Amino acid sequence: MSPSHTGADKNTALTPALVLGVLGVVYGDIGTSPLYALRAALLHFSSDGLERWEILGILSLIIWSLILTVTVKYVVFILRADNRGEGGILALMALAQRSVESARARWSIALIGIVGACLFFGDGIITPAISVLSAVEGLKVVDETFETAVIPIAVVILVALFLVQYRGTQSMGAVFGPICAVWFFVLGVLGVIEIVINPTVLAALSPHYAVQFCLEYQLVSFVAFGSVVLAVTGAEALYADMGHFGRRPIRWAWLWFVLPALVLNYLGQGALLLRTPSALENPFYLLAPDWFRLPLVLLATAATIIASQAMISGAYTIARQCVQLGFIPRMEVRHTSETEEGQIYMPQVNTLLLIGVLILVLAFHTSDNLAAAYGIAVTGTFVCTSILAILVFHRRFGWSWPLVIGVFGPLLILDLLFFFANVLKIPQGGYVPLVLGAALFAMMTTWHRGRELLFARFRQDGLPLKSFIARLPQSRTIRVPGTAVFMTSQADFLPGALLHNLKHNKVLHERVLFVTVTNEGIPVVPPDRRREVEELSPNIHRVFLRYGFQESPNIPRELEALKDVGIPFEPMQTSYFLGRETVVAAAVPKMSRWQQWLFTIMSRNAVPATEFFRIPSDRVVELGVRVAI
């Protein structure tokens, strides 16, 4: 299979509106990196003054990181690995899983995807904090009296940003693109002005300055790598947002607009530092003339809000994918657009993100301090993506091992260099995403394991559905008018809710539907594969509903569509029977005590199935059952 034919390649015609949309959604995060990346890297070597070759070396490292990590790895290669038009770490994980057959290999791939998703959430908390802080810190350049106001202003902006999330991004999206276009234009212009004054900085385009820097500092250059990676944060967004725009607009915007603007601005900051070393105080804002600094602060703040918005929206998307793939409990999903399925709001995720962001701002105080916490989350996701890409390009696209290793081997080595360089920053704040990621990893694996044990117990204790159907005509069970819908995760076994209903009420409805919802490793299930109906006996049917990891289930809507296949369905004459499991410890527990405790807490706090499946609450009958695992 050719990489260019893996799915819906949305190579639509390039239009100004489409390119503006890409600028506003895809490149907001990486576009705000010039605010802090170069300064953070050079600060490590500034104690005895900065030499010309040091400035050019760091600049060269940043520029070639943008070329190799973003342009070569993501824009040229990773964007080819779409999962039916969708991208992102979990889409790539699902694609890799379909290329292997053994259960152990699929679980190993799932673990890589889980690690990447956990680190993405860490990135989602740090990005708004560091971006908004770095923008507001420009006020100190305008006037030193603003120094004490930086944190309060940043907190107000962040709280306001999270409080308006329930309204959705549609109303705000109209201005995101134009603001980002102005932002990138200003980045480029500020850089060009300084480059014209000191054109010798263009020597940094040569990679030999990067090599010279690494040879001169040897192991100490690892410190620089830990900050240089800040220039490529947001690269994962290129891949994650491919489903919204298609690969062609993303590539075009990067190669012809975003990359030139970023390179010009970094070179401009370098030229300023070569001419005025004291500008290291804040080389980005000191690029601008005095009269333009306050407007630049306002523009930068708007750009960082947009970057934060893109990361917050991405966190919602990844969280919903985790729910659909069975890695975290059901959570409330609100759709904020009547036309766009992908525009969602998740209240629980929003609250947790806000709490995490505020804790980081109040604990670290400055963007320089937060820079230490930033790198590990980003580079860990880079490593996971490279490993999964190697599997996909070899097993699914048929690339030979020499070709795969020749292409992705050097890129993986670069990712590992970035990652281990950031390991050095663990004491200064790098522990934040690691602690967060470890906690999320424990939650996801515990939930996945607990659900597997529950399903195994259901199969062990359950009555085969075929046996029940075969004995039903002789049972003389009273049938009453109406339709009963029994939700069951095990399609071949009788739902416990039906057994309890027969035991206590001694009746069975005139029409019975056994509904099983399955989630597939593709973004969206085509309409012709959504429903599968099997008649078990007169007026008793088994219904399979399939959803992709980008979709939210709507059971009543799908059941109403059964009229098309001759099954009458009256919503006001339908009752939904659901089982609510209470997990207790078995005589010989199959989970450790702490995992059982965690799984129980997560089960109790999961969104009820009625809300998740959009079932009318006044039509639901819940029957409890104790399950020992």
Image: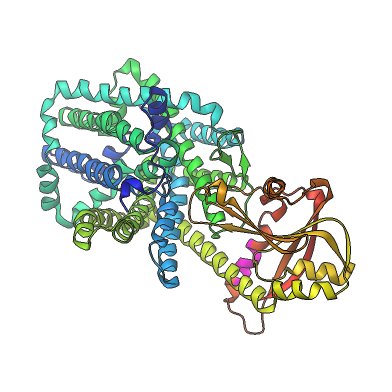
Magenta segment: 596-602
Q: Residue at x 52, y 51 (%)?
A: 549
How many discs appear?
0
Kindly identify the residue that appears in the image at 67 percent across and 73 percent down: 458
Using the image, determine if residue 252 lies above or below residue 299. below
Please identify the dominant SS of the magenta region: helix
Residue 442 drawn above or below residue 520: below
Q: Is 597 colored magenta in this rendering?
A: yes
Q: Is residue 40 left or right of residue 626?
A: left
**Residue 297: x %, y % from top left:** 40, 25
Front-most of residues 7 and 365: 7
User: Horizontal and vertical percent for residue 279?
Assistant: 24, 30
Q: Position of residue 450 (x, y in %)?
A: 59, 69
Judge whether residue 31 can be spotted in this image: no
**Residue 595 location in percent, x, y?**
58, 71
Seen as rendered, the residue at the extreme top is 291
Give left or right: position of 286 versus 307: left
Relative to 94, is 301 above or below?
A: above
Q: Which of the 4 image quadrants contains residue 364?
A: top left
Choose between 326 and 292: the one closer to the eye. 326
